[in-house]
Amino acid sequence: MTELDEKYMLRCIELAAKGLGYVKSNPLVGCLIVKNGEIISEGYHHAFGMPHAERVAIDKLDDKTQIKGSTIYVNLEPCSHYGKTPPCAPYVAEMSPCRVVISDIDPNPLVNNQGIKILKDAGIQVDIGICSLENRKLNKRFFTFIEKKRPYIILKWAQTLDGFIAEKNQNCIKWISNAATRQIVHKWRAEEMAILVGAGTVRCDDPQLTTRHWHGDNPIRMVVTNSGNLPLNAKIFDEQAKTILFYKNILNTTINGDKIDIVKIKIDFIDTLYAYCIENNITSILVEGGSQLLNTFINREQWDEARVIVGNKVFGQGVRAPIISQYTHIDIENIDDDRIIHYIR
């Protein structure tokens, strides 16, 4: 493989990233068609249920005979099975490119080398592995879901300069972060499939858990409760988005609605959560708190990223923020007078 191969594949990955927050449980995929040293078409998977990247790039060309003898770049193995859309591998093979360059094999058992076999059986040269690190970083949600059989977990909280996430005996919302940072949080929500909070957060803050300050779909709202003591007029039950209520002991059975699912916790909450996510193809969760819930994931080492907002406030006393001790990488970003500390396990 050459430097040009890397250049073209990085462009695929750049295109693929445009689908973040829209492709739902599907991977982020981009595609380039290159002939005689020129990009003659490109595309990416725009949204769940819409054509995949390869079909977008191919169908942009009025004269598809141009594809014969070309090189097609795609950052994930073309699919070989029917889902919401027809399989891509046979369609690519039909166009007779001389070569297909792929970042990674699709680990989904429905694909997993079968798309590559279709291409090779058609006499097409297939090269695999270029820019794999960049592709796996982009598709971290997809790879975690398939390989670890659980959603990608992002922890998020805001804390004061002296390390508190809430005041003592707090009975109303007191913002720690600034308006610009809160808008970024709504962008994060739009990028993930679900958002999770504990019952204490619902009772105390009555959050909407939506993307109202950012363009994008609302995530699935998830709440975990032991007692089931939740106000029936809580905003999470307003049906702006689907709400999943995980309960352990007692539940107010009057909670119902077309967009509300009620799930009984079977012994362990995280196991029940993961089983639900696997069954419903929920590939990522933004865990927004409170402290007990966040610490559950931290203590069990069941997290992939943590995004900690440090606001320019001091409480003096209150509910202590969780502490991250195990991580492999850290970034710090300044947003006006806030800092966002980004940990990666």
Image (cartoon, helix red, strand yellow):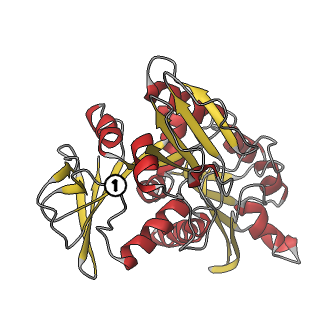
Q: Residue at x 35, y 46 (%)?
A: 290
Q: Nearer the viewer, residue 118 or 16?
A: 16
Q: Which residue is mark 1?
A: 171
In the rendered image, the vertical position of residue 306 relative to residue 113, given as above or below: below
Please, what is the three-letter code of the amino acid marked with disc 1?
Asn
Work out whether 117 lies above or below 89.
above
> In this rendering, does residue 44 appear at all?
yes
- Residue 66 place in picture, x, y as percent: 81, 74
Is residue 287 at all visible to an observer of this figure?
Answer: no
Relative to 342, 136 lies left or right: right
Give the image location of residue 48, x and y in percent.
72, 56
- Secondary element under disc 1, as helix, strand or loop, is loop
Number of disc labels: 1
Quarter-of-image position of residue 303? top left
CA neighbours of label 1 inside 10 A, class few (<14), some (14 to 19), many (20+) = few
In the foreground, 338 or 8: 338
Q: Nearer the viewer, residue 278 or 246?
A: 246
Q: Position of residue 187 (x, y in %)?
A: 50, 68
Q: Is residue 219 left or right of residue 185?
A: right
Picture coordinates of residue 55, whole percent (x, y): 78, 62
Q: Report the residue at 51% width, 60% height from top.
A: 189
- At horizontal 74% and vertical 69% (from top left) the residue drawn is 57
